[in-house]
Image (cartoon, rainbow, N blue to C red):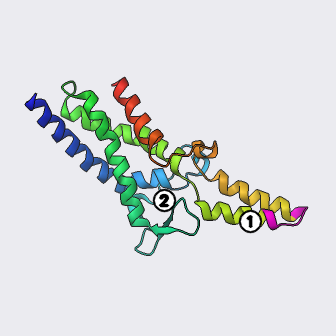
Amino acid sequence: RTKNMLSVLMQVFAIVCVVALIWVIYGYSLAFTSGGSLNAYIGGLSKAFLKGVTVDSTAATFSNGVVIPEYVYICFQMTFACITPALIVGAFAERVKFSALLIFMVLWVTIVYFPMAHMVWYWAGPDAIADAAKKLASAAAGEAKTKAQAALDAVVGDAGLLYQWGALDFAGGTVVHINAGIAGLVG
């Protein structure tokens, strides 16, 4: 119905605006920084309000030796953060109040999306892993080899839980589609 179509469009627009704001305030930091003792599950707040991000800061890609400006990476990842809850809206059409939907989405991206993005997509990048692996390969036996192995383990250990388990999600199948599908099904 036309009434519901306009309602869903308004809900999607509002959700995209709210999630974009949350992303800049604390979402990027929770998804893409180290989280201390909870690092396998969620990041920290070291980049809340994009603290420390400058026009000169860079982010790693999936290619050795290739980096992009961190602001570009933030905007790219923000599109996934905005699109994912917008996908859920279709499952809630005609069944939820606007205010309840906004509250749910704020809680959902904070409790579900940001930790899942961290667990799947947070890692040091290929250069850090390749450098540590090269040092391990070139290390002599004994103490040097042990130190190089510990350095490689530390780099891999500073990643999200699902990444550590070997999950590679280049296009958002886990973080976006499975996440949104389950939320829509449950809702």
Q: For the residue labelled by badge 2, is the local secondary structure a helix, a strand or a loop?
A: loop
Q: Residue 105, how many percent across, how many down?
A: 31, 38
Left or right of residue 187, residue 99 in this image: left
Q: 114 or 47: nearer the eye?
A: 114
Q: Is residue 34 above or below residue 127?
A: above
Q: 184 or 62: nearer the eye?
A: 62
Q: Quadrant of residue 104?
A: top left
Residue 134 is marked as 1
Q: Quadrant of residue 86?
A: top left
Q: Residue most toward the right?
A: 142
Around disc 2, counting alpha carbons within 10 Å, would you say few (fewer than 14), some (14 to 19), or many (20 or more)?
some
**Residue 138 belongs to the span the image colors magenta:** yes
Q: Residue at x 30, y 53 (%)?
A: 21
Whichever of labels 2 and 1 marks the residue nearer the N terminus, that label is 2
Left or right of residue 107, residue 47 in this image: right
Q: Residue 49, how many percent across, how many down?
A: 38, 60
The answer to whether residue 71 of the structure is visible from this angle is yes
User: Disc 2 vs disc 1: Cβ atoms closer than 8 Å?
Assistant: no
Q: Residue at x 25, y 28 (%)?
A: 92
Under mark 1, the amino acid is Lys
Highlighted magenta segment, given as a residue range? 137-143
Residue 119 is marked as none
User: In front: mark 2 or mark 1?
Assistant: 1
Q: Residue 65, how many percent across, how many down?
A: 57, 69
